[in-house]
Amino acid sequence: MTESDFPEVLVPDSDVTLANKLYLARENLRGADMQSADLVYADLIKADLIEADLSRADLSGADLIGAVLVNANLLGANLSAANLTGANCIKSVGRFTNFSKAILVTANFKGADLSGCDLSNSDLRGADLSDTLLKGANLTKANLNGTNLRNADLTEADLSGASLVKVNLTSAILKDTILRYVDFRGADIRSADFTGADLRGTIFRGADCRSSNFSFVKFMFANLNKANFSGCKLVFATLTKANLMDIDLTGANLECADLIGANLTKANLTDACLRNADVQGADFTGAVLARTVMAQPEEPAHDVEDDLT
């Protein structure tokens, strides 16, 4: 995926004066101490900011297209509405940084620490966030289509309303993450850990989720139509009224899962385990149930004399 695959992106309009705008395009600022600097709307296109200290700096609306920020310190900086298209931010530190409404198309944040940062309403299409720490980050309504989040840690992050079409989340950690109404169509989510995540109203149509852990996950009203959940762990998952039509649940563990009113029409449950699952009102029309375990707990033993008293 290259930058040319995406439409042109523009920095949002602003009434802020540009009279004092700094022009630092292509400047060598490697290792520079720019703590708390006023760089509002600065021109830093392709600037060398390797290992620069930009902690608490105000870079709102700044132009950082193609800038190199490898190992840069962005702790607590303000990059709201900044343009970092194609920027190289490998292993940068951006804890609690404000990236809200920023343009981060095809930016490279591989191995960066973005814990607790604000990426709400940001454009991250095609960005590389593999091996990135995003614990507790705010990614609400962010565009993550085609983003690489392989091995990323999104524990307790909030991605409500975000779009993750064709995202790569293989081996990612999303424990207790909020993902309400997220679009995962065509995503690669193999071997990920979603334990305790909130996935209400999500769309997983055609997603590859093989061998992932969805234990204790809330899937109410989710659309998992034609998704591949083979080998997944869904112990105590809540799938109330979820759309599971044509889903592949081969070898999946749904022990104690809540499938009340779920649509499992033509679902493949070969070798799946539904022991102690609640399937009241669930539709299994045309489902494949070869070697599926659906046994309920046995009635507790009682004394015959009890029946005669």
Image (cartoon, rainbow, N blue to C red):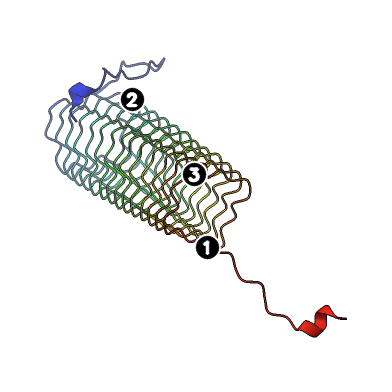
Please, what is the three-letter code of the amino acid marked with disc 3? Leu
Find residue 243 and report its horizontal and vertical position in percent: 51, 38
> Is any atom of residue 153 visible in this view?
yes
Q: Residues within 10 Å of mark 1 (few under 14, many from 20)?
A: some
First reached walking from the N terminus: tag 1 or tag 2? 2
Q: Which residue is mark 1?
A: 275
Q: Which residue is mark 2?
A: 61
Q: CA distance from mark 3 to mark 1?
A: 23 Å
Q: Residues within 10 Å of mark 2 (few under 14, many from 20)?
A: many
Q: Which residue is mark 3?
A: 199
- Closer-to-camera residue (142/243): 243
Q: CA distance from mark 1 to mark 2?
A: 55 Å
Find residue 290 and report its horizontal and vertical position in percent: 42, 55
> Is any atom of residue 23 visible in this view?
no
The number of numbered discs placed on residues in the rendered structure image is 3
Please, what is the three-letter code of the amino acid marked with disc 2? Gly
Q: CA distance from mark 2 to mark 3?
A: 33 Å
Q: Is residue 255 above or below residue 133?
A: below
Disc 1 versus disc 2: nearer the observer: 1
